[in-house]
Amino acid sequence: MQQFEKTMTDKHGRRNAFPFSRGIAWLVQSMALLRLQAGRLILIAVFMQLLLGLTQIPIVGILIILSVPALSAGVLQAFEVTARGGIPTLNLLFRPLTSGTHSGRLFLMGALIFAVGVISISMVLSGNEALLDPDLMSRIEQGDIDAISQLDQQAIGKMIMAFLVGISISGTLSYFTIPLIWFGDRKLGPALVEGLRAMVRHWKPFVMLALGLFVVLIPVVLISGALFGLASGSGVLSMIILAFIMILILAFQMVLFGTQYCAYRDIFGTGAAEEEPGEPGEPGDDSQLLA
């Protein structure tokens, strides 16, 4: 597999903006990395989802929410190890949580994302008393179907829009900020500014990447929907089908993380905080950096 291509720079030493086609390259690279260590990477994704399932627990839930950027950095580290020919292990998911200054910056990033998400969602939901009812929202968050049925179509549409707005803003803010903090050893402020500037500068490949991800998402949604209909009953077969749907969704989630990693390494280069050099194929070795 080819190595990451070196990026041409202009006379000021800045990286030239990438063309539209680069976005598809990141998607292909991400899928290639996932194929190399699919089992281990999806296992890491499963444990991350199990942790995120604890957000309903008081106090612990807040800590989990604040730790999401650190957990995301752990997933990116797993892709880093995979790209270097190593074997990603489960402990990589938790490494950023115990990394001293990095963990503090990542927790601050989590607080920022949480605050921005709450503000943006509240602004979208403003004026709808049903959606601002804390008891009703708590029931919806717990998956209460009866609570959702109490909402009219306009309220449901507004709730979906609020969710998409919150995800979009949070994802944009954190996309390069997290790897710049973890790999690039940046402080939160400079990482945030540098990451947003890079996304604006390289907007073309990100447009193509979004289109490519949408195309990949279509069969995931169709297959999941068809299988979910088959799993409407009870029994072992239904559990197997639901487990397959979960794996399919987690695989798509890991493709997203992979594109984030590939885009970061392509735009910002390999000048990241690395481990000590090791034997060929170990995390610290550059000789097997994959495309």
Image (cartoon, grey):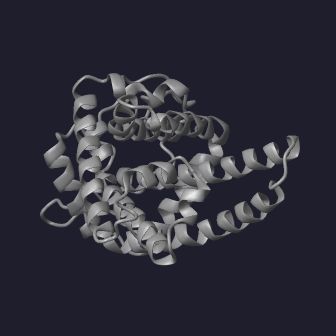
Vertical placement of residue 194 versus 50, above or below: below
User: Which residue does the image show at 47% across and 28% down from the upper left?
Assistant: 92
Say left or right for 150 vs 195.
right
| Residue 81 shows in this picture | no
x then y, percent, for residue 17:
28, 70
Q: Is residue 281 visible?
A: yes
Residue 217 location (% of width, % of height): 60, 66
Q: Position of residue 165 (x, y in %)?
A: 36, 66
> Residue, x 73% and y 44% (percent of image)?
243
In which quadrant of the rendered view does residue 14 lie?
Answer: bottom left
Q: Residue visible at 60% across and 47% down?
A: 34
Q: Is residue 195 left or right of residue 89?
A: left
Residue 86, picture quadrant? top right
Q: What residue is rendered at 20% in x and 62% in y?
A: 197
Q: Is residue 172 above or below residue 200?
A: above
Count up the numbered dots: 0
Residue 61 versus residue 126 in the image, above or below: above
**204 vs 253, nearest the viewer:** 253
Residue 79 screen position, x and y as percent:
49, 41
**Of 244 and 282, the residue lying toward us:** 244
The part of the image, by quadrant, that contains residue 90 is top right
Judged left or right of residue 266, residue 89 is right
116 or 70, nearer to the observer: 116
Which one is nearer the viewer's eye here, 42 or 34? 42
